[in-house]
Image (spheres, rainbow, N blue to C red):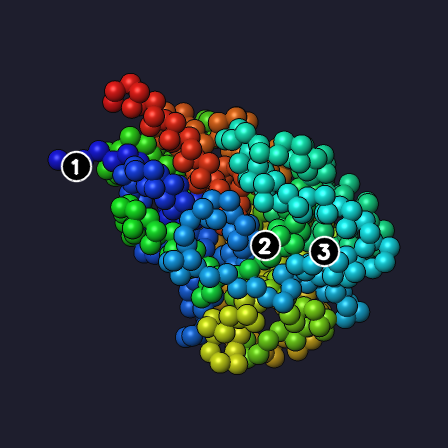
Amino acid sequence: MTSLLDAVVVGAGPNGLTAAVELARRGHSVAVFEAKDTVGGGARTEELTLPGFRHDPCSAVHPLGAGSPVFRTMPLDRYGLEWLHHDLPMAHPWDDGTAAVLSRSVAETAASLGPRDAGTYRRLVTPFLGRWETLFRDFMQLPLTALPRDPVGLARFGLAGLPPSTWLLRRFRDEKARGLLAGMVGHVIAPLDGFATSAVGLVFALAAHAVGWPVPRGGSQAIPDALTAYLTELGGTVHTGFEVKRLDDLPPARAYLFDTSPTALARITGFGAHHYAHYRYGASAFKIDYALDGPVPWTAEAARRAGTVQVGPTAGEIDTALRQASSGTAPDVPFLITSQPSLVDPSRAPEGKHVFWAYGHVPNGWRGDLTDAIERQIERFAPGFRDRILARATAGPPELAARNANYIGGDIACGAARGLQLVLRPTLSPWPYRTPHPSVFLCSAATPPGPGVHGMSGHNAAKAVWRHLRNLDGRGT
């Protein structure tokens, strides 16, 4: 007879694995079931183009992972996770060959914005830097999963972060500062005038100054691989190649956690469709992974040293592209987020070669081809880029959704990050990890604090499961 497990987790992405680890290291019996043949979710590494070129199909750079409050409590370095830092976390090039930069140094960042905005930037970020670790922990545990350790600092951050980022941009006089900040807000794939979008830009900026925007040696796969190894040492088990179609497919357990979209949870469990009826999925991405014969020939020197390069350049261009993608139109001039991990990690490509990826935003479920528009934008700031392409692998919304079932319509954020849904997801509830079934919980990026490889949605959901299991034990079951 099968023994009763304390918890079963569906989905071996960073959040599902984090939830499993958190439960296992508190003595609970845990099993994880993953439909794909490997763990990883949105943090995988594969040879998508040519042999020896190791690409990250989704996430590649991890400012929220390096500073994750829950990852910092785990000995993941023992299992091979090593963070590598570029000379610059991020660069934002301009047509004249210059670039605004996001540096580990506040002074260097401020100086790149020009004399009229340098002081404004320093005044914006400096109050939060000395208390960043505590503030970030409080921010990532909202809503009420833990009492804030620095309520005054959190309140001050809220005053700065809750307004739309368009308000924040008005504090700056020149386009370089506005473009840099607008690009950081654009990482959530939503228009700039949304509720709490200022917080998005602030979080990314402060993370760069506090911990950088690093990449894992060998690729993003190193993160779920380390979590899996730690979980196995703690006694948990991981079953890959196991697609869960019904709740009855799983072994009996006292609690079930789903690192899935709300849509998949409702389909598998047979309940929750009405509960999540108002949950919305957002714009998608069109992503290209490149095998290159050399580094990207950016005109701006700073871009040649940066791990991430935002290609906009102006806040107006960025906002237009985001609005078009969110309203059903593929942009003619897309805003691009690009990553060049092999600059700092030669193991990612054969000697002298490089891997590089870029994505622009497109409507949910879009079936067109954005390749030419993306490469025109890159050539605008890196003339001769096309001459260095050895191979490319493209993925639009259908391909992204096929790779990862959480990406409904290609939405890599597992739900639109706009309006109240940016902070209150998947429902307007102080208990977002609970579902209509008392033994079933949601732990994916569809729950707070939302998208990103940080494991905090899994950590927060695990806390809800601890309380559930304590209540069961208190009733003698």
Is 426 situated left or right of 467 in this image?
right
Residue 205 appears at what percent x and percent y?
A: 67, 51
Residue found at the very far top of the displayed protein: 475
Q: Identify the residue position indicated by label 1 in the image.
A: 2
Q: Residues within 10 Å of mark 2 (few under 14, many from 20)?
A: many
Dot 3: what SS?
helix
Hey, which quadrant is residue 225 in on the image? bottom left
Instruction: Indicate which disc, 3 or 2, sits on the residue closer to the N terminus.
Output: 3
Q: Identify the residue position indicated by label 2 in the image.
A: 211
Residue 65 appears at what percent x and percent y?
A: 51, 51
Label tally: 3
Quadrant for the C terminus in the image: top left
Instruction: Indicate which disc, 3 or 1, sits on the residue closer to the N terminus.
Output: 1
Nearest to the eye among marks 2 and 1: give it: 2
Q: Amino acid at mark 2?
A: Val
Q: On screen, 180 above or below 201?
A: below
Q: Residues within 10 Å of mark 3 (few under 14, many from 20)?
A: many
